[in-house]
Image (cartoon, rainbow, N blue to C red):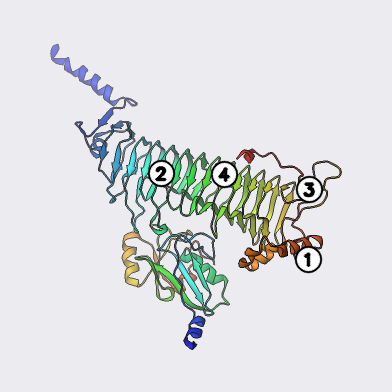
Amino acid sequence: MASLLLSACTPSPKDIEYGHDVCHYCKMTIMDAQHAAEAVTDKGKVYKFDAIECMVNFELENKDKEYAFLLVNDYNRPKKLIDARSSYFLVSQNIPSPMGAFLTAFENEKAASETKEKKGGEIYDWDSLKNSGIKGIKK
Amino acid sequence: MHRHAPYPLFLFLLAIFALPGDARTIIVCPSCEISSIKKAVDIAADGDIIEIKKGTYKEGNIIIRKALTLRGIGYPVLDGNNETEILTVIADGVTIDGLQIQNVGTSYTEDRAGIRMKRVKNFKVKNNKLFNTFFGIYLEHSKEGEISNNEIKGQAVQENSSGNAIHLWYCKNMLLENNHATGHRDGIYFEFVDSSLIRNNFSEHNLRYGLHFMFSNNDNYYKNKFMNNGAGVAVMFSKKINMWENIFEHNWGQSSYGLLLKEINDADIKNNTFKENTIGIYVEGCARINYTHNDFNRNGWAIKISGGCLDNIISKNNFLSNTFDLSVNNNANDNKFDGNYWSEYNGYDLDRDGVGDVAYRPVKLFNFVVNQTPEAMVLLRSLFVDLINFSEKVSPVFTPKNVLDNRPAMKKIKNLGSAN
């Protein structure tokens, strides 16, 4: 019983139902399993996003919230959600993302550079991304 | 003298073949001398016509670098074997007419298409059938093109492995007409597409949207039909889009809309029919939009306005038997309702000028309850709800003061879409 109560209070990520769930920020149906994102607050509220740029903008607009999880799709493993704060991000004009920021996430710097070799672009980490001022992200 | 005779003849022949407009026709058929489309494309010159006879051609990755016309006779089949893109056009002035293109195969890393037009202009893609092509017709950085009378049928069941039927990215001055798009992610997708016209298309059974605008300006769409899509049409982050005489029908589902408007301005929405959708129009953060002469027929909500919508005019529309005519979640909305017909209106017209003598308030109290607690919807038809709606009507406390139609029409307005 105690563990049940405890588990009910521990924030945890939820699976994204692609084609069904709606982006909290832009209201679009979440379709793209390579660009979606999810934020879970320390109170356990789950926000789902169709694009990483939507989650970045949401976070920038809701600075008072604390997040237990900030998750993004790994470009190389569709549907897989990885920790945004330790991910590397590629902004490449050759990889469109759902909300026009051309923003894609990778699990590590090596994977990001490999795709950068092929498609071109700039690599950011989570903090530099938020201050990057790239198109599609609020200043 | 006869020694020189061949020389002028040669010149004469040369002149014939080099004359502009004097195009050759190259025939391709399975039993012909030229049995491969790639071969025909290879030997053709600018302006030539390649006539492809009936048959199945297992050819993918056909790249067209010259101004050719590919014309199918009796719908020849180009099959990509679920492995490759099929036609890629990188030259101006190409026409693709009357082909059946099928089996492109999905990919996570490439947006493969049945027909791709890449950085080209003055082209036509018409009368084609595309089956199971992941992305059907994909246009990028192109302009002055016509996409007409194509049938594009996908088998999208899984949203993340589906492409769009007609996909435009960074295009200008395009015409999309009489196409039928079904079984894809979006029927028609516009991203950074300006000054284009979408007319008489039918988009149905697509997983996400029948038509989708992103960051596109100065476009018109009219006389299209959007049925049974995840949501009918989404217009987002765009300016000056005219939407006329379209039909939005049967877009049901928890978060489904006939039309979704998000962060757009200066749009004109006229003579459309919204019939049997969960939400007829969902509006968020939109300014200077005119909604006139539309019919809202048996929707869950006819219009749902959420957050920061300014200077919108809602006039001369018919609101017919919707569960809710209007929902607003914010008193700061500054929208004008004028001269609409509301089937729920039960005021009177003593001076018989066709205008109701008491104002109509389209927002019901129960709306607020449902917005706060969606589960309360089960009480909709209960006496209790009738009572609170009635008491609110008598002395409004919760419903926004400024959301009212001062001149409700007594009779249904004859709109262009009313026949639908």
The vertical placement of B96 against A4, above or below, is: above
Picture coordinates of residue B6, whole percent (x, y): 17, 17
Measure how far apart labels 2 and 1 are at the Cα level. Answer: 53 Å
Of marks 4 and 3, which one's residue comes earlier in the chain? 4
Three-letter code, disc 3: Arg
The label shown at residue B152 is: 2
Q: Earlier in the sequence, mark 2 or mark 3?
A: 2
Instruction: Say few, some or many: other residues with alpha carbon within 10 Å of mark 2 (under 14 / 14 to 19 / 20 or more).
Output: many
Mark 3, residue position: B407
N-terminal label among 2 and 1? 2
Residue B247: which numbered mark, if any? Answer: 4
Relative depth, front residue between A73 and B58 = B58
The residue lying at 55 percent from left, 40 percent from top is B223
Q: Is residue B406 left or right of residue B321?
A: right
Q: Amino acid at mark 1?
A: Val
* Residue in the foreground of this view, choosing between A51 and B172: A51
Dot 1, how many residues are within 10 Å of its Cα: few (below 14), some (14-19), or many (20+)? few
Subunit ID for the residue under disc 1? B
